[in-house]
Amino acid sequence: LAQAISDLKEGYKLSIPLVIFGHMHKQLAYRRGLRKMVVHGTDGIIYLNGAVVPRVKRLMHTQEASISNSATTSSRLTVPKPRGSVREFTVVEMLDGKLVRAAESWVSVTGDATKLEEEYVFYNH
């Protein structure tokens, strides 16, 4: 990656304000906290790790069901049923070639309906 960035900057004289990459683990090993989502490089580039795992979580609701053990005995059982999902998106906003804002956004999808459930802003200039 470093070589590719160097080649682009030198060979094509490109300005590279943002590099987005993905490494899955949000939590560091051995309970050392969370990884950094945004790093300001010494080269003036902002590096954004956009990977979050899992990216999709199922939304569940419970439904009661009757179960008959015999002709005389029945019991109630609570059964989880899927009702949609919540999906993660890493959203960036750029203005005049510069990163203005970056956020981890969680959107619920239930049938045809979508809704922003949570948003964690990790860069706001």
Image (cartoon, grey):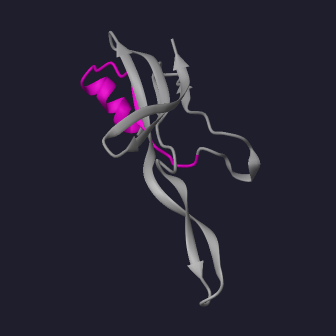
Tell me if residue 83 comes above or below residue 92 in the rendering: below
State the residue at coordinates (53%, 21%): 123
State the residue at coordinates (57%, 48%): 25
Q: Which of 17 and 52 is in front in this view?
A: 52
Residue positioned most to the front: 72
| Quadrant in the picture for residue 120 | top right
Indicate left or right for 87 with 111 as reference. Answer: right
Q: Nearer the viewer, residue 103 or 47?
A: 103
Q: Does the magenta stretch include residue 106?
A: no
Q: Does the magenta stretch include residue 3?
A: yes
Q: Nearer the viewer, residue 113 or 107?
A: 113
Q: Where is residue 90 in the image (x, y as percent from the top left)?
A: 44, 33
Q: In the image, which residues are magenta? A: 2-25
Residue positioned most to the bottom: 70
Q: Which of 122 and 39 is in front in this view?
A: 122
Q: Where is residue 42 in the image (x, y as percent from the top left)?
A: 53, 22
Residue 17 appears in the rendering: no
Q: Where is residue 124 in the image (x, y as percent from the top left)?
A: 52, 15
Residue 83 appears in the rendering: yes
Indicate left or right for 15 with 90 as reference. Answer: left
Count all numbered tags in the image, as a single digit: 0
- Quarter the N terminus occupies: top left
State the residue at coordinates (34%, 46%): 111
| Quadrant in the picture for residue 116 | top left
State the residue at coordinates (60%, 34%): 36
Q: Position of residue 62 (x, y in %)?
A: 56, 57
Residue positioned most to the left: 12
